[in-house]
Amino acid sequence: MGKGTSDSDSASGPAPVIVFDGVCALCSRWVRFLLRFDRHGRYRFAAMQGAHGRRLMRAHGLDPDDPLSFLLVEQGRAHTDTDAIVRVLAGLGGIWQLARLARLLPRPLRDRGYRWLARNRYRWFGRHDACYLPTPAQAARFLD
């Protein structure tokens, strides 16, 4: 299996890609959480500071230099903010499908809370000098 590929690449297309802020401590924890609970290797990852992540952010109208959005690209479609988070969690299967209940709250309300967290994430959770580095076993799931 080569770098940037996944067992979940299939005839239906490539695995969904999560674009994350690689220097954000909270975002890196989110990626580690997903690596732990995504037992089927469904998701691939691209730091928005890398070439793939920057390209995906721009292709979907987001500024990689002002990252207030979370991006999931799945089957060629972009999902952002809380819709993306709910899709990712539900995609883990099992108990995580309960995340769909968050859709009972209106999206503008959910996204307002997400943006508040995104604006304050460096202050509250910290910032790394470099992007999250996966283990050798995880490296195939990262695009950069």
Image (cartoon, rainbow, N blue to C red):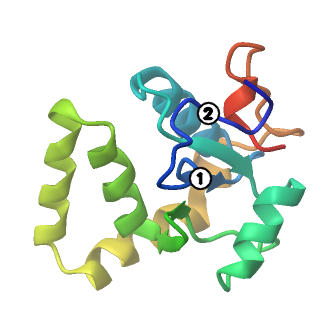
In depth, the one of 65 and 113 nearer the eye is 65
List x then y, in percent, for residue 128. Answer: 80, 38
Q: Is residue 32 above or below residue 69?
A: above
In depth, the one of 15 and 37 nearer the eye is 15
Position of 142 with respect to 68 (left or right) is right
Identify the image quadrant of residue 40. top left
Amino acid on which the number 2 mark rests in the picture: Ser
List x then y, in percent, for residue 12. Answer: 47, 55
Residue under label 1, please give it. Answer: 17
Position of 115 with respect to 48 (left or right) is left
Q: Is residue 111 above or below residue 4?
A: below
Secondary structure found at label 1: strand
Determine crowd level at label 2: few under 14, some 14-19, many 20+ residues with C-alpha closer than 10 A. many
List x then y, in percent, for residue 21. Answer: 70, 53
In depth, the one of 68 and 72 nearer the eye is 72
Q: Nearer the viewer, mark 2 or mark 1?
A: 2
Residue found 38% across the figure and 75% down from its top: 111
Residue under label 2, please give it. Answer: 6
